[in-house]
Amino acid sequence: MRIPFFSGHLRASAARAAIAAITAITAGAAFANNVIVLNSAEATLSLIDENTRQVVGTVPTGKEPHHLMPTPDNSALIVANSVSNNLMFVDPKTGSFQRWVQEIEDPYQIGFSPDKKWFVSTGLRLDRLDIYRYDGKNLSIAKRLPLAKMPSHIAFSNDSSTAFISLQVSGEIAAIDLTTQTVKWKMKVGEVPAGVWMTPGDKYLLVGMTGADYVAVVDWRNQKIVKTIQTGKGAHNFRSMVDGKHVLVSNRVANTISIIDEDALTNVGNITGLLPGPDDMELFADKKTLWVTFRFAKHVGIIDLANRKLVQTIKVGRSPHGIYFFNRAPVTAPNGA
């Protein structure tokens, strides 16, 4: 099955109505650089003006938008609507609606392989991994791979040969051969693994243990845990600090963010005083501020990294999850990973 990026399969009248409504909402914010926040429980995007830090628009999405990421050419930002079984494409600078892609089943987390040849989608409620071929414009399904239970986050080897998937309920990591679309191996890592992150040089795989209070360091070539790094309860998701040395992990139960040295594999500091449920994070291009969604508090927060303090909060919708803005520091892993 070949799925064009530039067309959808909504009924014509419904599609026209949806597009007209969304276009009208986003028109006023079309010239701003907006921070884009997914409100998973409200099926909306909140648009926050990057300069004024005020909400300037709310855009309807499909049901349960959880994660997002830009297309390889940065021409669009993909919003994955897991319950609606579709993808919504918006302008990555403004959040203005572009198009729908239908018949993408249960896209919870999404990611492009480093070589941009593969598009991977985890089906959290379907216990499945969907692997698509990507030709720079279109998606075509390569394999729907059963993968119990509750496949969640994604990381890739830099040579694009392998995708690593956390399985939240079974407490495992699965390694997937992308060329053959088969499971290479699975290994137990702990309680409720979520975010996965590859350290420089593909040396180790870091796994956030949302059901515990640490990050597991996995020697993935030999399928063994070599170390655990104490962070905080609900260790969940990662974001690079883009210095080649450190990665951040959000601790969703402890309400903290830990800073991990990727060479020493140690926790070198914690950001405290946060609202409940820190989840996904984005680093501003100047590397001075970190924006974070507070999943249980209906707010986005801005952290001054020099002082490691929360300096501002912005009210958004219910259960804010993924976050993105165009003027960001580079990232090499799926966002909202």
Image: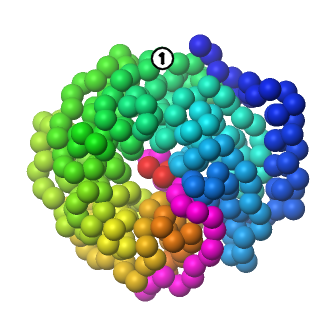
Which one is in front, 3 or 161? 3
Q: Is 265 above or below relative to 62?
A: below
User: What residue lies at 49% left-to-right and 64% top-to-bottom?
Assistant: 295
- Please give the range of residues in magenta: 306-334
Alpha-carbon neighbours of circle 1 within 10 Å: few (<14), some, or many (≥20)?
A: some
**Left or right of residue 270, residue 273 in this image:** right
SS for dot 1: strand
Q: Position of residue 119 (x, y in %)?
A: 51, 30
- The reply to whether residue 329 is in sight is no
**Left or right of residue 133, residue 90 in this image:** right
Which quarter of the figure is the N terminus placed in? top right
- Name the residue tied to disc 1: 142
Residue 333 in magenta? yes
Type of amino acid at the residue the image marks with label 1:
Ala
Which one is in front, 101 or 112? 101
Q: Quadrant of residue 33?
A: bottom right
- The reply to whether residue 272 is in sight is yes
Q: Position of residue 126 (x, y in %)?
A: 43, 31
Q: How many marks?
A: 1
User: What residue lies at 63% left-to-right and 74% top-to-bottom?
Assistant: 315
